[in-house]
Structure formats: C-alpha cells, structure tokens
Image (cartoon, rainbow, N blue to C red):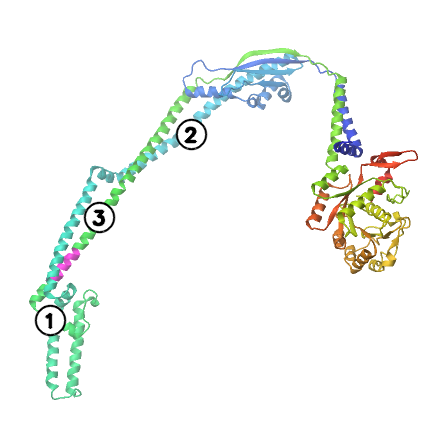
Amino acid sequence: MTPPIVKRYFIAFEKYKWIGLASFALVVAGSTVVAIQPAPPTTYVADGALTYNRPPVSFSATGSEIQQQGQELSQEVLLSDQIIESVAAKVNVQPKTIGTSVALNLPEKNRAGELTSTIINLKYKDTDPKRAQEVLQELMQAMVNLSGEINTRRLTAIIQKINERVPQAKSELQAAEKKLEQYDRIQRPAILAAENGTLLAAVTSSQNQQRQIQLTISGIDAQIRSLQDKLGLNVGQAYVSSALSADPILAGLRSQIYQTESQIALLRKDLRPEHPNMIQLQRQKQAIEELLQQRAAEVVGGGGTAAPLANNVTGIRAQSSLDPARQQLANQMVALQTQRETLQQQFAEQIREEAKLRQEYSQIPNKQLERSRLEQEVGLKKAVYDQMQTKLTDAQTAEAETVSSLSIARLPVVIADVKKQNNPIVTLGVGSFLGLLVGGGVIFLLGALENTFKTHEDIRNSFKQREVALLGEVPLMPVEDVDPAAMPILLSHDSPYLEFYEKLRSNLRRIGGKDLKVLLITSTISQEGKTVSAYNLGIATARAGKRTLIIETDLRSPSRATSLKVTPDPDASVEPLRYYARLSECIRLVPDVENLYIIPSPGPVRQSAAILESSEMRRLIEDARERYDFVILDTTPLSVSNDPLLIQPYSDGIVLVARPNYTQENMLGEAIDQLVEAELGLLGGITNGADIAVFVPSSDETSLVSSSHLEDSEEVSAGAGKN
C-alpha cells in the first residue's frame, strides 16, 4: 500500500511538474555555467605582520593608559576608509580593490581579557607580486601612523577636557567654602553655646525664675483670700465698691435719694400715691436713680466688662457704701491682684523663653550635621580640584612619551597562490543532484501550500479527529455518455461502483435508523461531487426496493436531471412557487431506474432563500415524506449560501461530501464545527473520488483496477467534479 505522503507528492507532481522541471533546469544551468568557467589566474599573496609596542620608560599613568588603549584597535579602525583611500592614492589602485583583497587577523583574548599574542597578521592578494608587496607595506605603515595619531588625539582630548573642567571645579570649591563661611556666621555662636554649656545654663536659670515667681504668686493668693474673708467681696466686687465709694458725686446723689425717700415716707401717711406731690417726689427719685446708674457706669468704665456692676439702683447704693477702713482693704486687694497678674505674665514669658531655649538646643545636632555636610562638601570639591590638577600635570608629562602602539614586526613577503580548476563532470553531477532536490522540494512545498486534502486518508483522519462518522468512500467513476456536461451515473445494473453506494446506503440506515426518511446532502464548496453522490445514492436506494425521491433544492444552479434522462420543465423558473405547489406535475419518473423519482430544480432563480422558506416547499417535503420511503435533498454548498441551513429543519439528518484535491482543510473543519455546535443533525461524511481499488469483472476473470488509473480521463475529472 502506498504511504499517504507519497500519494500527496505524486498528486502535487501531476499539478506542478512543469514548475519542478523548470527549477531543476535552472539549477543544472547554473552548475553548467560554473563548470565551463576557465581556471582562475594565479594570484600572489603578500604576508606581513605588525606588533604592539610600548615606550621603554613610562613616567606617567596617562601615557601608560593611552598605550594600553592603543592595543585595542579594531579591524574596522585599522581598515577604515581613510587608511584605504590614502594608500590607494599612493599606489594608484582602486580603494574598493584594496578593501576586498586585504585580510587582517587580530590576536585573540583569553578569559581574563588579556591578549594571547602581540602579533597582527596581514595578507593582501593581487595578480602582480610587486604591487602586492608595495600595497601591503603602505597599509602597514599607514596603520602605524594611524595608531600614533590616535594616541596623540586621545592625549590632546584628555588635556583639553581637564582644562575645560578646572575652572568649573574651582568655582564650585569657592562656592562651597563661601556657604560654609556664611553658615558659621549665623549658626556657629549657637553651636558653641551648646558645646560650652551656656545654653543649658540659660535653661536652668529660666526654670529657677519660674519657681520663684510661682512662690510669690502663692503668697499673693494667700493675702487675697484673707482680704476676701474680711470684706466678703471678691477682687472684682472690691474694685467696684472702692471706686464707687470714693466718688463724691455718687455720694451726693445717694444723699438726695435718702432725702426724697424721707419726704415720701412722711407724706405717705397724709397723702395718697395719686397726689401730685407724691407723683412729683416719685419722679424726682427716679431721675436721681437714673443719674446714679449713669454715674456708676462712668466710674467703673468698660461697660461693666472689666468689673461687675449691679444692674439695679439698690445694688449700686450697696456697692458704693464702703467706709474708709473697708475701702483701704479693698484697694489693697485690687493692688495685690494687679501684682499677681503681672507675675503671671512674667511666668508665661519665662515658659516661652525656656521653650525657645529648649527648641534651639534640640536643633543643635541638625546644625552640627549641616555644618559637617558643608565641611565634607568642601573636602570633596577640594579633592576633585586637586585630582584635576594632578591629572593635568600627569597628562602634560605624558606628551613626551606618547608614541604609536604599533610597529612593523615582519616586512611583507610575497607567495604565489595557484588554484586548481574545478572538474566539470563533478560540478554537473552535484548540480543535477541539487536540481533534483530543489525541484522536488518546490513541488512538495507548492502542494503543501494548497491547504487541500490530497488523499482520502487525509479526509478520513479529519473526520476521525472531529468524531464524525465516515459513511462511505466512493472512487472516481468513468462517464459513459459523450456529453461533456454529463455526470458518472450508475444506470447499469452490473456496474462495479454500485457496491460502494450500497455500502453507503446501509451505513446510513444503520446510523440513522428507521426514522431517517429525509436526507440532506451538501458540501463545503462546489465540484466536490455532492450531486453525483445524491443521484447514485438515490439509484442504490431505489434498486433496493425503496420508493426514492430526489429533490434538487439547489435553486442557484441549473438542474442536472438530464444525466438521469429527465428533461426539466422550461417554464418552472417563471413561477417557482406554482411549480412546487403542483406535486403531480413537478415530480418526474427516472426512466432507466425503477422506484426512482426526481423533482428537477427550476433554477437558477432569484430569491432562492424565500422559495425554500415558503409554505409550498414545506408542504412539498411533508407530502413527499408521506408518499415515499426515502427522500434525498440535494442543496447548495455551505460556502455559497445558507440555503442548506434554511431547509435543514425539513430533513432528518445531514451528510457532508468531501473530495481529495478539492476540499480545503480549514473550510471542512469550520463546516463540521458549525453543524455540530448548532446540533443540526450531522450524520457523517462521504469521501468522493477516493483512490481505492475497484473490482471490474471481465469476460474471462475479475480484474482489480485502481481508481487512480481513471484520473487520466478528462471526462472522469469533469463528470465527478461539477457539483
């Protein structure tokens, strides 16, 4: 049995053999051109060497560093355009020729980064030995000069860079010193006070003064309490009573009030309150009392907020009636209160002063750290400035010892390089072998890029991976009719291909069961043989004794009923709905097959979807389900339209047809996934045009013929691939 990969290659070879032959011819032609090339001319190789060197005596670190850097020149630097162009101008050779003919081998480095050798090997090829030696010698001398120039430029750049940085470093050092000086002017006294203990002594003195003031306030509080007990007044009342009692106007007003009250008391016995004299005396008393209140408010002052003042005349008269002895005690109490308030203010001031001293003392560590930071900054700036001065001096010293890091270790020596001519036979043999590989690879690659199934084994594996039943594999069949539009139909009773459709029919009956009466057959694209499968399955079913009806529901294509020798109604496309409504007129009997009937398609027609969803189509299929044992619906491909999905509800199951060299892998997978996920009743698949053996009976014996032999016939490919 031929492996599937070999089958796929032979199929691709049949399609792309001319492209493969063209690729083979191109490779062979290229090898022929190489084989007939004449022997190359003799070339001469000039071989020389450079070495790394150092000055005999080194007085500066900068000079040693520059010499060390000179040993790290790359090939791009040594063979730069500047070097090649300068040498080309001297020896009168094209720069491009020198660049392609020179070879340079730098010494390698070990794991520690050190050079394993100090020798740089150079080679130059040319057809003239004298010119080869001259060019290589000029190249080596130019490289030596370039190394010296690079070292000098590096030293000059170092000196220039230091000179550029020195003024800035000096100004930064001066700025840092100035900041330290300014900080010392402001914060240094406080730091020194903290360091010599003056600040702590001030805090202690403040605390002592606070204790002394508190003792004094305690004594004053005792005196005030003693006077309060004697007078029966607090400090505020004592202040008001002393002020009111000392005022002569208030004393006079009080006397007038007493006189008026005395007159009222005398007249109250003889006169009624409504008497004019009584009313006049009352008014006079009220006027004097108002004057008393106004004068009391003037004496106390502040609207009564500083010292409490009685709201009525009686209270004012009582507060202003102190005798001289009590008045002296009240004045003493007020003086003590004033002294107490003064001491309290001094105590609060001492507390604030102590807090200020403590806060200043707490900031001393930060100030010391800030001063240390400024001192460090000055030190760093000074160190940078001193290093620059040292580096500048060292670089100026290195000017006297900076030389080239390269020198000529070995002068160029010319050696002849004679090449042998290639063997034409060997070259052609290798070219032919490579041509076969390239041609075969191109054919295989083009076949793989088609994204189509090459063999029926590939389709079988695809169905198996998606757990879809393979109902049957049908080989390619010859077309007996000379009509190019005809299809391979099994009208003959002794056809050897009828057995494959009989197996397909039995598999459908086994999987679908007795309830399977209406079967829908579709495919992913056209030319996969769905119509051929539908017709031949109908023939196999009819010959099994079942009344079978084939309904062409592909309304987007013309009817293929002529392959069954049935002539479609030419007027059916005018009124398709009326055509389907008359069941007796649209059903045709297949003349050469008993029990087989067909309803030819009126297509191509417009609005095929509306016709498939119409009530006429529904009644037609329902009536056919009752009258026939088996109904086959031949629909459009899934990639063309959704017509199979519209008519699917009328069917009992769907069969998907695939064909090698036509069915695309991704489209078949998407179709299966769509039908399975939507639960549309996918029963299985059919492989049409499979490369399988067929028993063909002959007059003397039964011969075994592979269906691949039939692919040479143009009629076979056309007939099986139309639908």
Give the camera-side residue of 4 and 359: 4
Q: Which residue is mark 1?
A: 321
* Residue 374 visible in image: yes
Which residue is painted at 18% across and 52% down in the image? 347
Position of residue 520 measured from the top left corner of the image (x, y, whole percent): 78, 50
Verify CB contact (< 8 Å) between mark 1 and mark 3: no
Residue 420, image x, y percentages:
71, 14
Q: For residue 164, which numbered disc appears in the image? A: 2
State the SS at label 1: loop
Residue indicated by mark 3: 353
Kind of residue at disc 3: Glu
Question: Is disc 3 surrounded by few (<14), some (14 to 19) or many (20+) residues within 10 Å?
Answer: some
Query: In the rendered image of this protein, does residue 498 appear above or below residue 589?
Result: above
**Separation of residues labelled 1 and 3 (CA atoms):** 46 Å
* Part of the protein shown in magenta: 332-342
Q: Spatial distance from mark 1 to mark 2, Cα to Cα?
A: 96 Å
The numbered disc on residue 501 is none
Question: Mark 1: which amino acid?
Answer: Ser
Q: Judge whether residue 721 can be spotted in this image.
A: no
As displayed, is residue 405 above or below residue 717?
Answer: above
Mark toward the start of the polypeptide (1 vs 2): 2
